């Protein structure tokens, strides 16, 4: 509405910064430094030497906007459509797996943890909004190979040949890998091989694979 003040950064460039963060595992402060330091990052972002670079607060704010406006799914769908138009998704078999995303461990008392498990976490710390903003009431504990994890699970279906993610869903860490199988498969998978580790074996999982008419290549239990 006005020509006064600093001009906003290009949203495509900001989105490409998010890609760099995910690809290299960089925090907001670190990616700002790396953009300043690396010519390859500048080239990818379309920046020349001496151009103004978004600071860490701008990057954080942009990522929050993507999340709060619920457009991440739409962007993911558009990206997949672009890949399919370029014939980069081959649909010659699908691979499914889950990975942990660790969340900061919470220091709650027994009563607070009980309320969170009962789904009443939003009732807590309303008189202390700053404290509440640091609390994660959706993450959960789980154990794998004797090691404890607190956080979430990313369940993904990947094109076996192109290695691009076709579909994904996120749950808390306590949800078993196989429980997300039905959410990941769809009618487009008909006739394709399905590869997964032995966590996806079982009668219910076999029924789900048959429902989508896929060829079961899930690794059997020893």
Image (spheres, rainbow, N blue to C red):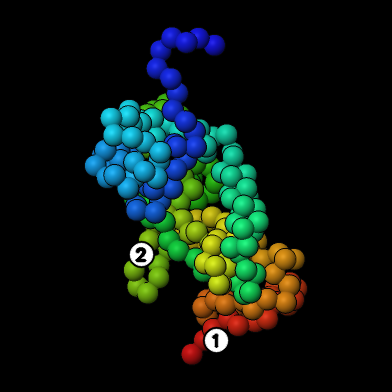
Rendered image quadrant of residue 53:
top left
Is 85 in front, or is 135? Answer: 85
Whole-number angstrom distance, CA of label 1 to CA of label 2: 25 Å
- The residue indicated by pointer 2 is 148
In the rendered structure, the answer to whether residue 222 lies left or right of residue 94 reads left
Residue 27 as seen in the image, left or right of residue 162: left
State the image quarter where residue 147 is shown: bottom left
Residue 110 percent across, percent down from the top left: 38, 49
- Asked if 220 appears above or below 33 in the picture, the reply is below
- Say left or right for 202 vs 150: right
Estimate the x, y position of residue 222 in percent, counting from the top left.
Answer: 48, 90
Furthest toward the front, the residue is 48
Q: Is residue 88 visible?
A: yes
Quarter of the picture holding the N terminus:
top right
Q: Is residue 31 visible?
A: no
Identity of the residue furthest to the bottom in this view: 222
Q: Which mark is residue 220?
A: 1
Q: Residue at x 59, y 50 (%)?
A: 79
Q: What x and y, as percent, mark residue 41?
A: 34, 45
Callout 1: 10 Å neighbours few (<14), some, many (20+)? few
Say which element carries label 1. Answer: loop
- Disc 1 vs disc 2: which is toward the camera? 1
* Secondary structure of residue under mark 2: strand
The relative height of residue 62 versus residue 214 in the rendered view (above or below) is above
Q: Is residue 136 left or right of residue 82?
A: left
Numbered badge on residue 173: none
Residue located 52% across and 38% down the image: 67
Please name the residue shown 58% across and 68% down the image: 159
Q: Residue at x 24, y 42 (%)?
A: 37
């Amino acid at each position: 509405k006005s020509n006064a003040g600093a001009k906003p950064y290009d949203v495509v460039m900001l989105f490409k910064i998010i890609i760099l963060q995910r690809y290299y595992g960089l925090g907001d402060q670190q990616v700002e430094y790396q953009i300043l330091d690396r010519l390859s990052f500048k080239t990818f972002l379309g920046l020349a030497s001496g151009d103004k670079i978004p600071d860490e607060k701008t990057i954080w704010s942009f990522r929050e906007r993507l999340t709060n406006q619920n457009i991440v799914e739409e962007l993911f769908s558009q990206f997949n459509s672009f890949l399919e138009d370029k014939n980069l998704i081959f649909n010659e078999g699908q691979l499914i797996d889950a990975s942990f995303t660790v969340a900061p461990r919470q220091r709650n008392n027994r009563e607070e943890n009980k309320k969170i498990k009962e789904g009443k976490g939003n009732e807590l710390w309303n008189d202390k909004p700053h404290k509440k903003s640091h609390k994660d009431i959706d993450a959960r504990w789980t154990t794998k190979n004797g090691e404890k994890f607190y956080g979430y699970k990313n369940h993904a279906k990947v094109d076996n040949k192109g290695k691009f993610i076709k579909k994904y869903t996120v749950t808390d860490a306590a949800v078993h890998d196989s429980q997300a199988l039905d959410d990941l498969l769809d009618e487009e998978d008909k006739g394709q091989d399905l590869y997964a580790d032995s966590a996806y074996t079982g009668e219910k999982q076999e029924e789900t694979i048959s429902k989508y008419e896929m060829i079961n290549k899930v690794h059997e239990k020893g």
